[in-house]
Image (cartoon, rainbow, N blue to C red):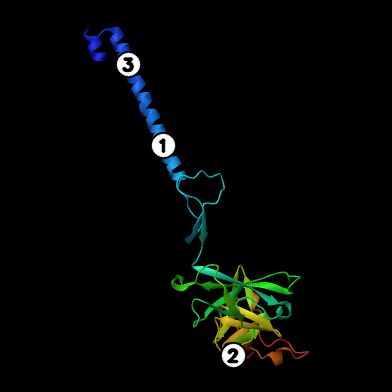
Amino acid sequence: MQQLRKIGIASESDYDQSKAQLDQWEAEVKASRGTGTVARLNLSRSRVKAPFDGAIAQRLVGRGDFVRVASPLFDVVNDAVLKFIFPVPERHGSLVQKGLPVLFGVDNYPTESFTGRVYLIGPAVTMSSRAFSVGSLVTNTNFRLKANTFARGKLVLESAVPTPVVPLESVVSFAGVTKVFVVEGNVARSRSVTVGRIRDGLQEVIEGLKSGDTVVVTGQNRLSDGAAVAIQSTSSARSPGKPPLAKDQASSVTHESH
C-alpha cells in the first residue's frame, strides 16, 4: 500500500486505513498468542500430580465436580514399601532396637510369613495399654500385600542364631555413616556396618563384619582408611604403670547367642 501511495494509485486515506487495519491485526495476533500461553499454563495446572509414586486407593471426586482449593481429590498409597505398626508392652522397652526383625502374616496368605525391620520406636507409653508403638518397614515384593490389611506379627527380641558383636567403643558414627576400622596386616581399613542391639558394652553388627575380623578399639576416631596401625593386647595396654605399647588397640569380632 505504501508503494501504491508513492506512485499515486492509492490515496493517503486508503494508506492510513490499511495501516490501521494492519496494526489491528498484529495486535489481535499478539493477543491470541498471549491467550494460547495462558491456556497452556492453565492446562498444565489442571493436571493433578501426586507427591510420590503409588496407587490410587480411592477417588473422591467425579468428572464435572466443583472442588475447593486444597480439597482432597484422591487417596493415594505408596504400596512399594508398607509400614507395620504395632504395640509392644513397656516391660520390653530396653530390648527393642532399630533393625530388629519383625515376622508377620496376613489372612490372604495364611501359609506364608513376611519379614520387616524395626525403623520406628515410639517415644511414649500409652497410659491405657501400658505399651508403646513400634513400626517396621517391609518391601512389598510384587505388590502382594495390600495397604490397611490386618496383620499378626512377632517382634524377634531374642535369637538362637549367633550374631557378630564388637566392643561398643569401636563403633564410629559421623554424618549418618556408621563404621568400624578393621585391621588387615598392619593397616586399618574403614568398614561400613549396620548395627543392631547394645548389651553389656557390646554392639551387635547385623551387616559388614564376619567372625574373626580384628577391629580397632582405641584411637579409631583419629584414623583414616589405609592408616598404619600396631596391635597391642588389651591386658598389656591396661596394666598400671606401663606405657602404651602401640598407638592403637584392637579386638577380635566375636559371636554372641541370645
- The residue lying toward the viewer, choosing from 246 and 69, is 69
Query: Does residue 248 appear in this view?
Result: no
Near mark 3 (Cα within 10 A), the count class, few <14, some 14-19 or many ≥20, is some
Q: Which residue is mark 3?
A: 19
Tell me which numbered mark, 1 or 3, is placed earlier along the sequence.
3
Tell me which numbered mark, 1 or 2, is placed earlier along the sequence.
1
- Which amino acid lies under the numbered mark 3 shown in the image of this protein? Lys
Residue in the image at 63% along x and 88% along y: 251
Residue at the outermost right position: 241
Marks 1 and 3, how far apart in space?
A: 27 Å
Residue 37, label in figure: 1
Near mark 1 (Cα within 10 A), the count class, few <14, some 14-19 or many ≥20, is few
Quarter occupied by the C terminus = bottom right
- The residue lying toward the viewer, choosing from 23 and 213, is 23
Residue in the image at 73% along x and 70% along y: 126
Tell me which numbered mark, 2 or 3, is placed earlier along the sequence.
3
Q: Position of residue 70 (x, y in %)?
A: 57, 47
Q: Which element type, helix, strand or loop, lies under badge 3?
A: helix
Residue in the image at 26% along x and 14% along y: 2
- Which amino acid lies under the numbered mark 2 shown in the image of this protein? Pro
Quarter occupied by the N terminus = top left
In which image quadrant can residue 24 be found? top left
Marks 1 and 2, how far apart in space?
A: 67 Å
Residue 162, label in figure: 2
Q: Position of residue 175 (x, y in %)?
A: 61, 67
Q: Position of residue 177 (x, y in %)?
A: 59, 71
